[in-house]
Image (cartoon, grey):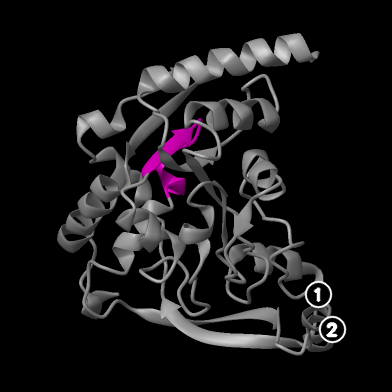
Amino acid sequence: MDERARAALESELRDDLVAMGVKEGDTLLVHASMSGLGHGPRVLGQALRSAVGGSLKGTLVVPVFTAENSLTSTAHLRRARNARGSAAYRDFKRRMPPFDPDLTRSQGMGRLAEWVRTSEGTVRSTHPQTSFAAWGCRALELMEGHEPDCHLGEKSPLGALYRADARVLMINVGFDVCTAFHLAEYRYLSNPPKKVYSCVVRDGSGRRGWFHYPDVDLDDSDFEAVGADLPEEMRKGWQLGRRTARLFSIKGAVDHAVDWMTEKRPCLTER
């Protein structure tokens, strides 16, 4: 795609974003699949930057999780499948690279997320499994303070985005990947069920080691149902280029998910 065609497409996408309600000064948590959009992440990313008013006015946030850096995730289990036998698996674990916020690629988060993560001026939170990346005027404010024992709760960028009254923009994806709903898992019970997570990190001296910590037992299996029950104005689909997008308040989504989970998830004694 030549520069003239790219600029024209960026302008069209920006107009679509403005039509659906994206404004200068917005803080957006973006989930996007580039499949079938007909262009690369740079075009969409530049359109998003323009729609929020550039780095002096707006902020873009994307999840850049590293699920393979875990002993419990399905992504890790898929990678370890060929390490048959205890000795082979021990060797596989020994060779797992430690998380590096500056270098470790996101896994399964999509091409737009990687484009944002690697863009100049982007700030990444430091959680070794569920980090976020942010570009724009509130990037540092939203990414700092991501505690290593808090995946997606109050001490994570999700909590900061909720307090900042950010909005969620979902492009060509379903509610099953709506990260905001995870914050509700920390809220709908006073003492939500937990499990122990393990990942590879470097300590203050740069030495590789394992970090084990308890945190909420996350479960996204009912997120599609949570999203399907959102108020109609939050589920409304807008045309964005060749695909559909949704834009809604993160506070509205999380508060709805808390109510939904309180009513419809099994009680703690049944889990």
Looking at the picture, how far across and down is residue 177, in whole percent? 46, 47
Q: In this view, does 109 lie above or below 238?
A: below
- State yes or no: residue 168 in magenta: yes
**Callout 2 environment at 10 Å: few (<14), some (14 to 19), or many (20+)?**
few
In the rendered structure, which disc, 2 or 1, sits on the residue that comes first in sequence? 1
Identify the residue at horizontal 27%, vertical 34% (top origin).
Answer: 234
Helix, strand or loop at mark 2: helix
- Residue depicted at x 60% and y 64%: 74
Residue 59 in view, yes or no: yes
Q: Mark 2 points at which residue?
A: 91
Mark 1 surroundings within 10 Å by alpha-carbon count, few (fewer than 14), some (14 through 19), many (20 or more): some
**With respect to residue 230, does 91 lie above or below?**
below
| Quadrant position of the N terminus in the picture | top right
State the residue position of label 1: 83
Where on the picture, by quarter, is residue 10? top right
Instruction: Name the kind of residue labelled 2 in the image.
Output: Asp
Pointers 2 and 1 in contact (C-beta within 8 Å): yes
Residue range (magenta)? 167-178
- Residue occupying the point 76% across, 90% down: 205
Q: Is residue 216 magenta?
A: no
Quadrant position of residue 211:
bottom right
| Image x and y of residue 12, in percent | 55, 12
Q: In the displayed structure, would residue 258 be above or below residue 96?
A: above
Give the quarter of the image for residue 239: top left
Which amino acid, mark 1? Answer: Ala
Label count reads 2
The quadrant in which the C terminus is found is: bottom left
In front of the other: 114 or 4? 4
- Determine the residue located farthest toward the front in the rendered image: 56
